[in-house]
Amino acid sequence: MSGRSYKDAIHLLNTLQSNAATLEAVKASGGRISALGIPQMVEYLERIGYKQEDLNSLNVLHVTGTKGKGSTCAFVDSILRHTRPGWKVGLYTSPHLVAVRERIRINGVSLSEELFAKFFFDVWDRLETNDQRNPSTTSAKPMYFRYVTLMAFHAFLTLKVDATILEVGVGGTYDSTNIVPRPVVTGISSLGIDHVGVLGRTIGEIAWQKGGIFKEGVPAITVDQPSEGLGVLRQRSVDLKASEFIIVPLAPEISEARLGLAGAHQLTNAGLAVLLSQKFFELKESVAPQKTLPASFLEGLKDARWPGRCQTVNDPKYPPITWFLDGAHTAESLDCCIEWFVSPSAALKLKGDEKSTRILIFNCTHGRSGSSFLGVLLGKVAAQLQLHVSRESFHSFFDKVVFCANVTYADGSFKGDLTAVSIPADDLALLKSQQELAVAWASMVPTFPKENIHVLPSIEHAVRVVREEARRGRLVDVLVTGSLHLVGGLIEVSGLSDVAL
């Protein structure tokens, strides 16, 4: 091994990514391949020197859901840190925006490059040294997400955290995070219907997967869900012997609280976070919930940050530019995004007599229906304009639209942490997905000027279009959405890390 720097760690980590063919095989298997995930993950954990029971000492709050799970985790993290400032609180989330080390945080701060490299090579060396495994089912090294999950467990155990907020990667039942024998409390955010059409699953099947994080003797908490999903979750809590099944009640106090995360949908996530935190302190410290929220809870809600989600960033280098960042990658999350953006607090905010030039930068993951996403976007823009009694037309709401690949730089290269091998090569070379988006936009908005529809090969190209507009002396409002990888790449290219992360 040539070196052991952060850059070396990222290079090796990227060799563990699943390519497009592998991802398609998992999807085609209907989850059967994923079913091997738990025994394999336990095997990897033991190979790096831990037993499953060791994970109980992390005092885990385990959270899943189709949408809002990351925001819920951010609220919980902030509440715990404000309530117990002397604690060491671990937070594990995915994906990252700019740097992989964002996924593993201690007291709200990403692991340093030095610590990330240390924990990466600790795990790497232990797997190399202890190669006792079932070779018919388990590879020498786990794939990307499993590897980082192992790193997170190793880091949190080594640093002796007092509490751990653990966000599920995908699903729940077979997710790599689901090997903690006894978390303190489990929670489920909103079950969306987006994946039903994409993966051919019912809301009940999705609920069954999510409910797989319930554990015997552990409280199971969920926000209100569609009736079919709620029924399945309730039954899962019985089958898995959860100590109680709680549906988050409507709390006027939360509705009146100031939230650090924008968007009306965050009220639901904040309510779940509050109940998870209350139950955690009740079980760990015998602190009964108060009739009114403690000041530390309210401060935690107010100070919560979750970059790249309904986030407004003023560009420090190009003051005329305001970036509106939301990595919405499902139809329902895109609906929430537009509800936030097309409102008096964002794009409809009065700025004197000058009207801002509005630019949409959009991309969506390979395999998703881009045209249907654009239909959701345009339909919601129209509905929001009507709601706010605006004279604008949804046809001309955006002045320019940019469909670009998630490639970071104009020379075709990726930032190391943002390297993606899951994009099919022919799709990337021909900009197939982006061309399809452009055609769909032109058909949905036939009056839109063709010269203002851009198909571009990189995020850096898209940033150039925005900056050129700003150089003409115009105010520019830019909505960047459809992909968290797109948002992360834009933060990197635009030099917004210091103000956005």
Image (cartoon, rainbow, N blue to C red):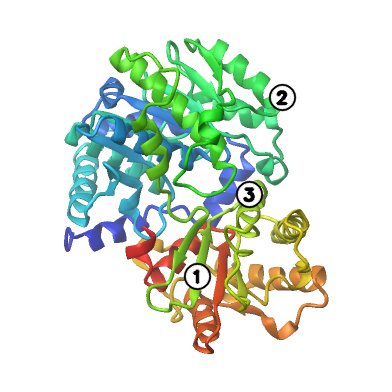
In the rendered image, residue 104, in percent from the top left (x then y), is placed at 31, 45
* Distance between mark 3 and mark 2 Cα atoms: 22 Å
Inspect the image, locate mark 1, and give the three-letter code of the amino acid beneath it: Thr
- Circle 3/circle 2 CB separation < 8 Å: no
Q: Mark 3 against mark 2, which lies toward the viewer?
A: 3
Location of the N terminus by quadrant is: bottom left
Inspect the image, locate mark 2, and give the three-letter code of the amino acid beneath it: Glu
In the rendered image, residue 392, in percent from the top left (x then y), is placed at 76, 69
Q: Which residue is mark 1?
A: 322
The foreground one among 391 and 323 is 391
User: Which label is found at residue 125?
Assistant: none
Asked if residue 33 can be seen in this view, the reply is: no
Q: Which residue is mark 3?
A: 336
Q: Mark 3 against mark 1, which lies toward the viewer?
A: 1
Q: Mark 2 against mark 1, which lies toward the viewer?
A: 1
Which is nearer the N-term, disc 2 or disc 1?
2
Inspect the image, locate mark 3, and give the three-letter code of the amino acid beneath it: Cys
Neighbour class for label 3 at 10 Å: few (<14), some, many (≥20)?
many
Q: Which residue is mark 2?
A: 228
